[in-house]
């Protein structure tokens, strides 16, 4: 498969399981042994940041910010740090490799489409052309699933505790006037760090990073992101 419009596309099994498998807030609540601590302390937990100068993070960041732009009425993907949340998810959380590959390959497919249509990568397009490009790929089953997957991560970034990489200072909660459940998990007590959820690092497979968006290919090196 080399584009969103490949007629042989089949929905990855990982995505079919998404709605039944992923209930992020419920999973985060597993850290019940954590003592309640101030939100300001939680935000000081070490969060690994995505390098948005390289692919696939450069293009993913642009897509996330287009899907939820900053505005005067509320925070956008930039303010809720959606890209850093996504980075921490694929680096540390028990996400199936098929889903990681789908996200990564989607960057190459998107830039392949915009190069053919506009002779430019997605990040270089105007807001109007970005919108047109995403609407075009959304007409394919693969494109619709890819965009839906990224939207899910945006919502998770906005609603999850800051220790997971997004929602700094509870900005998403404040905007939604939401009172988060307590206790909140700090670093070291996040749901995927609990023994029954923790990943064996030797089983992790990385998403390849590149400065060329059209050459993004997943690697099976066994090395953690």
Image (cartoon, rainbow, N blue to C red):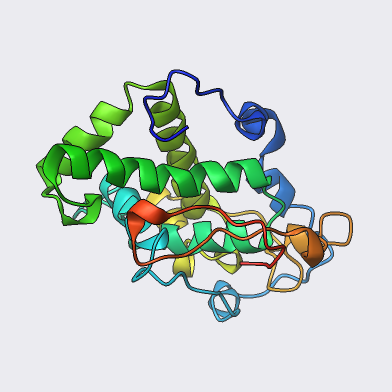
Q: Quadrant of the C terminus?
A: bottom right
Q: Taking 129 as reference, is 14 left or right?
A: right
Write the residue at 78% across / 66% down: 201
Q: Name the one closer to the observer, 103 or 20.
A: 103
Residue 95 placement (x, y as % from top left): 67, 48
- In the displayed orientation, state which residue is furthest to the right: 196
Q: Taking 213 as reference, is 156 left or right?
A: right
Residue 179 placement (x, y as % from top left): 55, 53
Which corner quadrant of the image does residue 205 belong to? bottom right
Q: Look at the picture and state if 202 lies above or below 180.
A: below
Write the residue at 79% across / 53% down: 30
Q: Taking 200 as reference, is 122 left or right?
A: left
Q: Is residue 159 visible?
A: yes
Residue 193 placement (x, y as % from top left): 78, 64
How many marks overall? 0
Q: Is residue 80 visible?
A: no
Q: Look at the picture and state if 190 lies above or below 15.
A: below
Write the residue at 34% across / 56% down: 213
Residue 135 placement (x, y as % from top left): 25, 29
Q: Name the one closer to the observer, 172 or 129.
A: 129
- In the displayed orientation, state which residue is furthest to the top: 7
Write the residue at 33% across / 71% down: 53
């Amino acid at each position: 498969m080399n584009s969103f419009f490949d007629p042989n596309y089949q929905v990855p099994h990982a995505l079919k399981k998404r709605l039944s498998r992923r209930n992020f807030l419920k999973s985060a609540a597993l850290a019940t042994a954590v003592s309640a601590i101030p939100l300001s302390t939680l935000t000081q937990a070490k969060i690994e940041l995505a390098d948005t100068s390289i692919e696939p993070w450069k293009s993913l960041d642009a897509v996330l910010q287009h899907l939820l732009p900053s505005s005067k009425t509320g925070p956008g993907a930039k303010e809720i740090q959606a890209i850093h949340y996504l980075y921490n998810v694929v680096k540390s959380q028990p996400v199936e490799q098929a889903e990681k590959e789908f996200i990564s390959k989607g960057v190459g497919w998107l830039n392949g489409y915009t190069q053919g249509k506009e002779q430019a990568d997605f990040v270089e397009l105007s807001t109007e052309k970005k919108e047109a490009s995403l609407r075009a790929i959304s007409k394919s089953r693969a494109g619709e699933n890819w965009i839906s997957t990224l939207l899910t991560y945006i919502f998770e970034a906005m609603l999850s505790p800051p220790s997971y990489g997004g929602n700094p200072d509870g900005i998403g909660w404040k905007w939604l006037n939401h009172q988060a459940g307590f206790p909140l998990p700090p670093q070291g007590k996040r749901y995927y760090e609990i023994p029954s959820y923790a990943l064996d690092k030797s089983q992790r497979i990385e998403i390849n990073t590149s400065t060329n968006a059209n050459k993004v290919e997943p690697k099976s090196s066994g090395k953690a992101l």
